[in-house]
Image (cartoon, coloured by chain):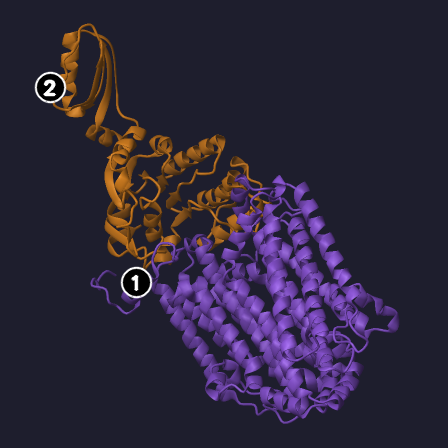
Amino acid sequence: MTGFAGTGQLTKLAFRRDAGILPVCTVGIVVVVAVVARDLKVLYPTEARRLALVQTAGGNAALRFLYGRLEGTSTGALTTWRFGVWAACMVAVLAIFVVVRHTRADEEAGRLELVGSAAVGRQAPLTAALLTAATANVVIVLLACLWLVALKLPAAGSAALALAIGACGLVFIGVAAVAAQLAATARGARGLAIAVLGAAFVLRGVGDTGPAGLSWLSGASPLGWVELVRAFGSAGEYWWALAFPLAAGAALVVAAFTLAAWRDHSAGLLPDRPGRPAASGFLRGPFSLAWRLQAWLLAGWLAGYVAIFASLGAATKGVGEIFSTSAVLKRYFLRIGYQHTLIDAYLSAVMLLAGLGAAAFATSAVLRLRTDETGNLAEPVLATATGRIRWALSHMSVAVGGAGLLLAAAGLSAGLGYGILTGSVSTQVPQLLGAALARWPAALVLAALAAALFGLLPWEATAIAWGAVALVAFIALLGPSLQAPAALMDLSPFTQTPKLPGGPVAAVPLVWLCGVAVALAVAGLLGLRRRDLGDLGPSYRSYRGRIHDYLVDYLQLDQDASRH
Amino acid sequence: MANAIEIRALRKSFGRTVALDGLDLEVRAGEVHAFLGPNGAGKTTTIRILLGLLKADGGQAVLLGGDPWRDAVRLHRRLAYVPGDVTLWPGLSGGEIIDLLGRLRGGLDPQRRQALTERFALDPAKKARAYSKGNRQKVALIAALASDAELLLLDEPTAGLDPLMEATFRDCVTEERRDGRSILLSSHILAEAEALSDRVTIIRDGKAVETGTLAEMRHLTRDFVDAEVARPADLGGLPGVHELTVTGTVVRCQVDQAALDAVLGRLHQAGVRSLTCRPPTLEELFLRHYSSERTTAGVPQ
């Protein structure tokens, strides 16, 4: 069929472009599932322990909202409960990013126009994107299934859980493909698909927690279909339930192909609203520009934070009961939260999660500097009476303020979620607000590292900064479980923050974390003041040449010292 | 009056690629100076050094009497810049971007903004992502022209404009010049430079190969002589005659200005029936500078 000519070439191109990120994400998702499954096996070795957990967790509405219904008392059933829905969410997010990246994002950037002028069929780019995402999906299914079997879980249940997660990924491949046809921008397409995922999560949550009359809601959600398969269920797997996601995914893909054949190149099907003919009084300088550019992103993060941390806060009430079901789990949480009472340990771990998210947002806000620099968006601002330092500070202010807003939202909503259920709003809100904000300096250290890299080592800034965020998240979340050495734990700034709530309040570590952040930021700004700006990437210089230039530039090895 | 831009022996390398190799450039106050060269000759690198985005490796650049690297912010209040490849924030409208750039620069004249928006027929309510290349170019041009900057740095400003808008742009530049603004117009569109500029600098491989008014440059170069004569004319031995072709009684050649008198004398002796003698167009000046040594251009050493 001529509509698909060139699909093979484009798929190869997509795999080449994603050669770094796709394997990392794929393996990352499998590792998360693997660690959770292994932990549950260790934490609940006996049937009696598991039964106790099922009885308490099954009765807790907030936990059912977060994780879904618990069907059965086997280790496999616990794994399905604890990570079936969440792994499906991660697979869905990966699918959305891969599909949109190779369809609407390329189209918006004009790359598909060039590709389309070659002997390439109209449907080839979409097909290539779908094949790329589907391949990642299949790899996740296979690896997850192998790991579960390797943990000596029943083969049928392992296959059912892996397939249920993969089938959900397939649905969201379809959702993303349709969203990429509807929205005219990559950001819009991603937002639309993520909104569908959020709605699916809420539908399933309400269906799982609400009165029996509403339980059909969960059956209307792609995430509810993951539960419907009943992997490792005591009554056997419901294999037929896999038909729902497979049929929905296929229907969505067909719809996407139909829309793609019908619409014009680069046009979306949703209307693009016109903007204002003149700027409002707000848009006056680099700071208001930076906040304006990141406003929607920050709003999305805030909405997500309020929803997640209100649920996690509301779940606190049942936590004590669950902990009492496993001595090992108790130890684990006490270690991650460094606490004496379980509730405080749990809340401290929740606030650590909020801190990690805030660090990720702040890092992305700082790295926006680099994106703008290479994307020629820094140039028009810097050609005006805006100095480099002010321009850099404008985006760094979004990082600092945004991280603070996110942590405040996390503290407030967790405090309200927990406080309303226990009638202790007036004590929980200030306590959790303080606990959340205690993670602010640690989050800023990571953002400041990104700023230092941007000023001193711009070509590698994005990779190293995100690598640092990933390392810190790994240390903070999995370090205690894997009993990582103290030297490794100390690398994370979050290890240094006071363990609030419950732990001793100490201002000293906060002050010196702030000091480290300021020092890193200043180093970055000093580097920025000295270096060339613009898209001067690896394209024009060899790696060795760049290291040489770096040494010459920063270690003052140049012969002509008097040039400025 | 001081020069708006004064560049002496400017050098800049990116790794092993030499972008500027001892460039000289002088833009006098109040003049339109065309900065011509093929892609990769170093035009944009020069402008980025003038904007303080890049740091020169050697030589000297003086912009409006200041150091473009050290005094960037102070100097940028007095200049406006139109990049060659205009990238805009996709979520902001054209009108918002014009206002924003104006405010960042320290103010813009709302009446001029209004008038220019109408002249360039720009819809300011559209989001930048919906603009074509030409419309993005217009946004940057309006923002620059509506400012009261004394120096305009225009990097291939008409690249995406249609002929009608290009004419509007030329009118605007002529008006700006009358108002006493200095303009550096980087371009590879020769007709544009020929129509607008007072003086021209041609750059190749990071060096200025020719600079001056068009009249001065023509003085340095050859006129094109095209004649029909009654009897075969003998021009072969004359110094300063190039690329001579004689087809029967039709004589074509290029003549150095110094040799023109002698050539006309010989033609006169042969009995002139028709004669055209014209200065080279900028196009021809350009070709002469680039076609001969093309092979060495733009290759990193």
Q: Residue at x 28, y 34 (%)?
A: B291
Q: CA distance from mark 2 to mark 1?
A: 55 Å
- Foreground residue among A349 and B140: A349
Residue closer to the observer: A172 or B250: A172
Label 1: few (<14), some (14–19) or many (≥20) C-alpha neighbours in 10 Å = some
On screen, B43 above or below A369?
Answer: above
Q: Position of residue A231 (x, y in %)?
A: 74, 73
Chain letter of disc 1 in the image: A
Give amino acid for label 1.
Asp
- Quarter of the C terminus of chain A within the rendering: bottom left
Left or right relative to A330: residue A506: left
Query: Mark 2, residues whose alpha carbon is within 10 Å: few (<14), some, or many (≥20)?
Result: few
Q: Mark 2 and mark 1, same subunit?
A: no
Return the residue at label 1.
A549
Q: Which chain is purple?
A: A
The chain whose colour is orange is: B
Amino acid found under the numbered disc labelled 2: Gly
Q: How many marks?
A: 2
Q: Quadrant of residue A188?
A: bottom right
The residue that label 2 is drawn on is: B237
Pinpoint residue A547: horizontal percent, then vertical percent: 32, 65
Q: Please report, as a chain letter, where disc 2 is located.
A: B
Where residue A428 sits: x, y (%)?
Answer: 69, 85
